[in-house]
Image (cartoon, rainbow, N blue to C red):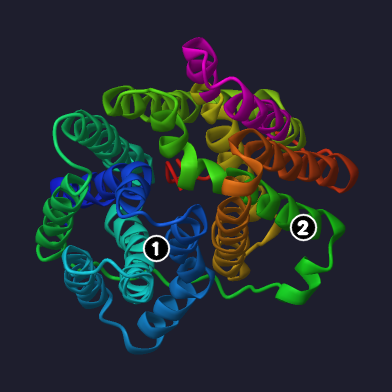
Amino acid sequence: MHRLPHWRLSGYYFFYFAFIGAFSPYFGLYLQSLSFSAWDIGLLMSQMQLMRLFGPNLWGWLVDRFGHRVAVIRLAGVIGLAGFLAFFWLDRLSGMLVAMAVLALFWSAALPLVETLTFDHLREERGRYGKIRLWGSVGFIVAVMGTGALLDWVEPVGVLWVCVFILAGILGFAMVLPEAPQHASSANETPIGRILRQPRVLALMAACFAMSAAHGGFYVFYSIHLSGNGYAKTAVGLLWSLGVLAEIGVFLLMARIARRYSLRDILLASFAAAVLRFLLMGWMVDSVAAMVFVQLLHGLTFGAYHASAIAAVNRWFPGKSQGRGQALYSSLSFGAGGLVGALVSGWTWDDWGAGWTFSLGSAFALAGWLLVWRWVVADAAVEPAKMPDPVQ
C-alpha cells in the first residue's frame, strides 16, 4: 500500500512559499538600502520573471528526457542556497544580476516538479492536495509577518539571513522527498496550433499577460511605497498577509462561486477589481483603510482570476496538450507579463512617481478587461481544477 509522505511534502511547500514571503516584499528594501536606483531594483527583481519564461519548460524537458525528478529538485535547492549566499559579498549591479539569474533559473525548476510529484503521490486522492498545499500559504504568512517585525529592529541586511535560513529549510525537505511513479499521459492529443488559433484562447493569453504586467509594480515596489509613506515594517507585513488571507478565502469559496458564475463573469470582475485596486494603491496610500481594502481585493485580482484562468486552460487545452497549455499560460503571464510590469515600473518610478506608476498598472488591467469582454465568449461555470499557487 502506498503511503503518502504528507508532512515531507507539506514542509517543502511551507518553506518554498516562506521564501517568497520573505524575499518578494523585503528584498527590494534591502536593495534600496544599498542605494540602487528604482530601475536597478526593477531590473534585478525582474530576473525572477525572466527565468520563468523558459526555465520551467527547460527543466520539464530535461526530466521528461532523462528522468531523475527528485534529483533535479535537490539540485535546485543546493544551487539556490549557494547562489543566494553570494548576496552577502555582492554590492554591484553586474554581480547581483548574475547571482539573481542563477537563483531564479534554479528556483523556477523546483515548484512545477514538486507539483507533479505531489499529484503522483496522491494518485486517486487528489482531494487531499489542498491540505498539503495550504501549508505553503501558512509559510508565506509566517515569513512575511515575521520578517517585517524583524526589520523594525534590525538593518535591512537582516532579510538575507532570514532567506538563507528558509532556503536551508527548502533544501532539507528536498533531501527527504521520496520519488513516486509518474502517471502516463492520455494518448489523445489535440494539435496545439489548432487550439491557439481560437480567438478566445489568444484573448485569454493576452489578458493574462496584461494582468501580470499590472501587478509588476506591486510586487517590486509596494513595500517601498508603504515604507516611504511612514508605514512600519510590521504594518507592511500585516498588509501583505491580509492579501494572502483574502486569497485563501477566495480559494475556499471558489468551487461554489464557479458553479454559480461563468468563467467570463469571474474574469471580468477580477480585471475590474484590478483597475480599482491599483488606482487606490497609487493615490490613497495615506489612508490605512484604503490600503486594507486594496489588499482585500487581492482575493479577486489574484485568487479568483488565477483560479478561473487555470480552469479555462484546463478546459480549452484537452488531453496531452493540457501540460503545454499550463506552461504557456505560466510563461506568458507570470514570465513575460511579470517581466514587462517589473521593468516598466522600474523605469517610471523615479520620473513619474508612485501614483502614475500604479495607474499604469490599472491601464494594463483595463486592457485585459477589454480583451475578455470582447473575445472570451460566455462559458458554462466550471469548477477550478485545483487550488492555485498563492503570491506569484
Q: Which residue is the site of mark 2?
A: 201
Residue 310 has which mark? Answer: none
Q: Which residue shows up at 55% across the image and 60% down it? A: 330
The relative height of residue 191 versus residue 289 in the rendered view (above or below) is: below
**Label 1 crowd (10 A; few <14 / some 14-19 / many >=20):** some
Q: Which residue is the site of mark 1?
A: 112
The count of marks equals 2
Q: Which residue shows up at 9% across the image and 60% down it? A: 172
Q: Which residue shows up at 63% across the image and 48% down it? A: 351
For residue 60, side relative to residue 208 (left or right): left
Which one is in front, 383 or 309? 309
**Label 2 crowd (10 A; few <14 / some 14-19 / many >=20):** some
Task: Describe the element under mark 2 as helix, strand or loop.
Answer: helix
Q: Does the magenta-highlighted stretch encompass residue 199?
A: no
Q: Position of residue 250 (x, y in %)?
A: 50, 26
The answer to which image quadrant residue 183 occupies is bottom left
Q: Residue furthest bottom?
A: 66
Looking at the image, tell me whether mark 1 or mark 2 is earlier in sequence order: 1
The relative height of residue 332 versus residue 285 in the rendered view (above or below) is: below
Magenta range is: 269-294
Q: Position of residue 120 (x, y in %)?
A: 32, 61
Which one is in front, 327 or 161? 161
What amino acid type is highlighted by mark number 1?
Pro
The answer to which image quadrant residue 127 occupies is top left
Q: Position of residue 155 (x, y in %)?
A: 18, 41
Q: CA distance from mark 1 to mark 2?
A: 22 Å
Q: Position of residue 369 (x, y in %)?
A: 79, 39
What amino acid type is highlighted by mark number 2?
Val
For residue 285, side relative to residue 332 (left or right): left
